[in-house]
């Protein structure tokens, strides 16, 4: 019918780094499904309907995430969440959510193509991020499962604490991704992360 | 630098916020009934208070919600933050 256009992730040129294991990793998690969901948190019927679709209860506590078998829901605001998954196609997830929210005051937007996830992992991850982020990300105050929208190196980012390696998922707008990745690599070099020359940006 | 207590996200540095001017200025219910002078007063005239000041801030880089901060305009001390009642 038509020629399929090969899809490109914002950081398609950046391969997973292959450093020594103890030095940590920096790589993109491309082509995940990102869906922005807004609804009234006081609407318990809508929350229940969403839970049916997602298999996870939307987190109502600010700056926390809720992880299900196949999907992560991150709190973005009192009535706003980001759904992240690799198990659902954006179109089908949006369709399912819209069906569950028929006749309700809600919004479901596929933002998969507009942003990407950069994963930073390793014992020095805190130091790498601290160079461009004012938040205290130590696991004692920002444990796995916490999230925060903030500024990272003057770019807006959503940070999600994944585990206490520590590992962070950094979600940035597509157009900011090359800059943020370059900044992270630059910051990470001083802490032992090495990058193949072919990936220099 | 100000450390602004977002009612949802907690204390964050002022880089993340947008200032929205004096708080507690309701939009006139019937703008058409106002004289130009009254309308201009609503649009432009602000108190520029010395001392305790209630002002609007938006957590632009965070949860993107507007809320009210009470700040001392002399010392920059933040005296508290609150939401707009039932809004979210």
Image: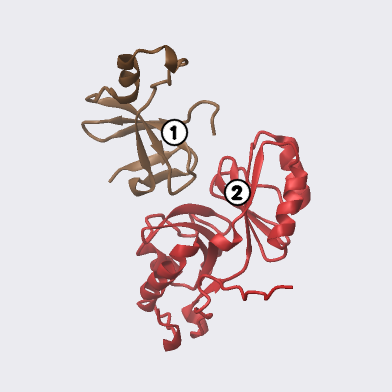
Chain colours: A red, B brown
Crowd band around label 2 with a 10 angstrom C-alpha radius: few (<14), some (14–19), many (20+): many
Q: Please state if A200 lies on the left or on the right of A39 as rendered.
A: left
In which quadrant of the rendered image does the C terminus of chain A lie? bottom left
Point out the residue furthest to the bottom here: A197
Q: Nearer the viewer, residue B83 or B25?
A: B25
- Report, in whole angstroms, how far the alpha carbon at label 2 lies from the one at label 1: 19 Å
Element at label 2: strand
Residue A199 at x, y = what percent?
45, 83
**Which residue is pictured at 56% across the width and 40% down the height?**
A78
Q: Which residue, given by chain and number where applicable, does mark 1 sit on?
A: B67
Residue A182, by quadrant, is bottom left
Chain under label 1?
B
Q: Please state if B27 lies on the left or on the right of A80 as rendered.
A: left
Q: Is residue A5 above or below residue A136?
A: below
**Which residue is pictured at 46% across the width and 67% down the height?**
A177
Q: Please state if A125 lies on the left or on the right of A55 as rendered.
A: left
Residue A51 at x, y = what percent?
74, 47
Q: Is residue B34 above or below residue A11?
A: above
Q: Which residue, given by chain and number where applicable, does mark 2 sit on?
A: A81
């Amino acid at each position: 019918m038509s020629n399929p256009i090969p899809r490109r992730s914002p950081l398609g040129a950046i391969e997973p780094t292959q450093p020594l294991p103890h030095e940590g990793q920096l790589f993109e998690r491309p082509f995940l499904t990102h869906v922005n969901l807004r609804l009234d948190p006081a609407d318990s019927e809508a929350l229940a309907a969403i839970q049916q679709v997602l298999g996870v209860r939307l987190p109502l506590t600010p700056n926390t995430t809720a992880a299900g078998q196949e999907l992560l829901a991150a709190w973005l605001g009192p009535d706003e969440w980001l759904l992240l998954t690799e198990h659902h196609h954006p179109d089908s997830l949006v369709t399912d959510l819209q069906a569950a929210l028929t006749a309700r005051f809600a919004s479901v937007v596929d933002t998969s193509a507009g942003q990407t996830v950069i994963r930073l992992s390793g014992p020095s991850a805190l130091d790498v991020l601290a160079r461009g982020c004012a938040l205290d990300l130590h696991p004692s105050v920002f444990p796995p499962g916490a999230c925060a929208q903030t500024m990272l190196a003057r770019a807006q980012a959503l940070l999600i604490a994944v585990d206490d390696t520590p590992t962070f998922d950094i979600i940035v707008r597509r157009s900011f991704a090359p800059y943020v990745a370059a900044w992270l690599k630059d910051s990470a070099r001083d802490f032992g992360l090495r990058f193949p020359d072919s990936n220099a940006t | 630098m100000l450390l602004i207590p977002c009612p949802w996200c907690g204390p964050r540095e002022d880089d993340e916020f947008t200032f929205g001017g004096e708080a507690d200025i309701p939009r006139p219910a019937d703008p058409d009934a106002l004289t130009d002078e009254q309308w201009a007063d609503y649009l432009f005239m602000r108190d520029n208070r010395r001392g305790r000041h209630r002002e609007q801030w938006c957590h632009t880089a965070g949860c993107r919600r507007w809320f009210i901060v009470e700040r001392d305009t002399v010392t920059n001390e933040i005296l508290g933050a609150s939401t707009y009642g039932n809004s979210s």
